[in-house]
């Protein structure tokens, strides 16, 4: 089944739905995922996007028989992952199990990556004879550092959940039974933030990591927040010791 999208208030959830195939991705999934990302981008109320999957494994990556097809410029696997990284909403990957191959890059494209003790990952590109696409290598280096990127790409080493946390692949490691609650807690925390700085800072932090920081664009977003109703509301709520009600204006 193709990935599904559900939107409820400030939160969207995309679910991978091939548990019998360890949620392997196929060429048909790529445009569907990009359509879902575009829908999220076009829905101003959505502040948080959760990426999850059904079954034991999070995702076993892209169908190896379709790898050549996935490298097509403009419509390939890497383009789909780039669209996820550039998604307007703050993104959370909920990893209940193993994540392999190209799926590891999907996870690194997310802003937060929650896993549990059942997690493991590996990147078998060199073992399969595949030279990875440039933006995927860039994400590995920017998120994990050069030494870890070389270790994972060049040796195809499999690492477990604690090592995933230690190297920065995971941002949170929680007991498996607590994972849904921790995802809910984080999504609720993010969804309660003021939209202008939440979404603006996400984009500018990513651009800093990519070496594409635009000081003028960041200054415009700072100025927009300074004159916003939300800043006044945040200050008033702080004084009154209550939860602020933000509107994105």
Image: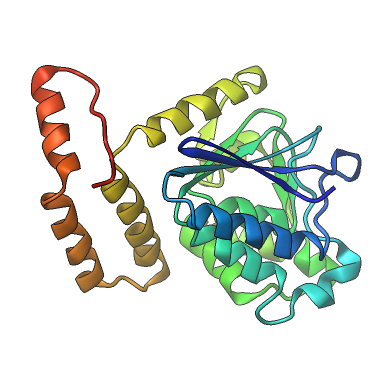
- The structure residue drawn at horizontal position 15% and vertical position 34%, both measured from the top left corner, is 233
Compare residues 137 and 224 and report the one nearer the observer.
Answer: 224
- The structure residue drawn at horizontal position 74% and vertical position 48%, both measured from the top left corner, is 3
Image quadrant in which you'd find residue 124: bottom right
- The structure residue drawn at horizontal position 16% and vertical position 43%, both measured from the top left corner, is 229
Q: Is residue 248 left or right of residue 15?
A: left
Residue 73 drawn above or below residue 43: below
Residue 238 drawn above or below residue 82: above
- The structure residue drawn at horizontal position 89% and vertical position 45%, both measured from the top left corner, is 21
* Number of marks present in the image shown: 0
Compare residues 172 and 214 and report the one nearer the observer.
Answer: 214
Residue 147 shows up from this direction = no
Q: Is residue 65 left or right of residue 44?
A: right
Q: Position of residue 214 (x, y in %)?
A: 28, 72
Q: Position of residue 8 (x, y in %)?
A: 54, 34
Image quadrant in which you'd find residue 204: bottom left
Compare residues 26 and 6 and report the one nearer the observer.
Answer: 6
Residue 53 shows up from this direction = yes
Q: Position of residue 45 (x, y in %)?
A: 42, 44
Residue 2 drawn above or below residue 63: above
Q: Position of residue 248 (x, y in %)?
A: 28, 45
Q: Is residue 3 left or right of residue 179?
A: right
Q: Is residue 103 left or right of residue 114?
A: right
């Amino acid at each position: 089944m193709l990935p599904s999208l559900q939107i409820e208030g400030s939160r969207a959830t995309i679910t991978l739905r091939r548990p019998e195939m360890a949620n392997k991705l196929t060429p048909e999934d790529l445009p569907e995922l990009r359509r879902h990302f575009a829908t999220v981008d076009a829905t101003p109320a959505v502040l948080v996007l959760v990426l999850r999957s059904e079954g034991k494994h999070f995702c076993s990556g892209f169908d190896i028989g379709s790898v050549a097809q996935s490298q097509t410029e403009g419509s390939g696997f890497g383009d789909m992952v780039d669209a996820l990284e550039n998604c307007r909403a703050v993104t959370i990957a909920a990893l209940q199990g193993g994540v392999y191959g190209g799926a590891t890059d999907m996870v690194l494209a997310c802003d937060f990556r929650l896993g549990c003790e059942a997690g493991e990952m590996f990147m078998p590109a060199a073992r399969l004879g595949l030279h990875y696409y440039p933006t995927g290598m860039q994400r590995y280096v920017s998120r994990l550092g050069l030494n870890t990127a070389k270790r994972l790409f060049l040796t195809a080493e499999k690492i477990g959940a604690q090592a995933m946390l230690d190297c920065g692949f995971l941002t949170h490691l929680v007991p498996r039974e607590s994972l849904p609650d921790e995802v809910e807690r984080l999504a609720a925390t993010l969804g309660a933030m003021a939209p202008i700085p939440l979404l603006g800072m996400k984009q500018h932090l990513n651009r800093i990591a990519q070496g594409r920081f635009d000081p003028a664009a960041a200054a415009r977003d700072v100025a927009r927040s300074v004159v916003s109703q939300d800043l006044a509301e945040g200050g008033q709520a702080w004084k009154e010791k209550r939860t602020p009600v933000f509107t994105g204006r």
